Image (cartoon, grey):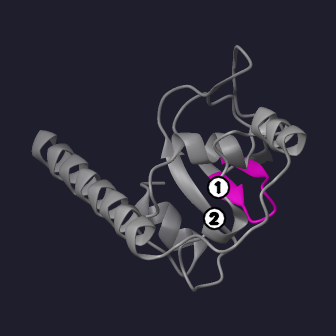
Amino acid sequence: MFFRRAREDRAFREVQRAGYALLQHLQATQPWPDAPEPSAPASAAKEAVAPDFLPPDLRVLSRHEVAGVMMRWLPPLVIEGEVRTCPGCGAYRDWIVFCMRDDSVWLRCRAGHETKEPGLDAAWYNRNSGPVDRFHPTLEEGLRHLGH
């Protein structure tokens, strides 16, 4: 069990390093598309809402059409100082967090109950998730990959 976790952690770190190297390479070789310079007040307003939110062109790094992305969240999920619990079964940890194309965030407990989470948004998801390491053709395959 310990060796499997270490191997999975090592594989995940390698994927992160490869993603970071790819981003560095793309930044060095491809200029950003020409875009008008935003005025100072508009820029400040956008930064106040979500300072680290990716531009729409970079949200999905694939040519495939995807409905959203997902990640596993093992510890208790604390939103605005409260531990989030499943309304169906009361579970408070081991979530699958979905970020959908419309920037909404959904939670799924281990029992399969799904609920929209208005306290989270795509900017939160981007801050807390790692790079996308796999694409799955079905939701069930993605859940199986994440251990649910």
On the rendered structure, is 4 left or right of 97?
Answer: left
- In whole angstroms, how far apart are the C-alphas of marks 1 and 2? 6 Å
Is 19 rendered above or below residue 67? above
Is 141 rendered above or below residue 93? below
Circle 1 crowding by C-alpha within 10 Å: few under 14, some 14–19, many from 20: some
- Write the residue at 69% across / 73% down: 34
Residue type of the residue flagged with mark 1: Leu
Is 87 rendered above or below residue 36? above
Q: Nearer the viewer, residue 104 or 62?
A: 62
On the rendered structure, is 114 left or right of 14?
Answer: right
Identify the image quadrant of residue 15: bottom left
**Residue at the top extreme of this rendering:** 81
Q: For the N terminus, which image quadrant? A: top left
Residue 116 visible in the picture: yes
Identify the image quadrant of residue 50: top right
Residue type of the residue flagged with mark 2: Arg
Which residue position holds label 1? 54
Residue 96 visible in the picture: no
Judged from the image, the secondary structure of the residue bearing numbered disc 2 is loop
Which residue position holds label 2? 59
Sequence order check, earlier mark of 1 and 2: 1
Judged from the image, the secondary structure of the residue bearing numbered disc 1 is loop
Extent of the magenta region: 98-111
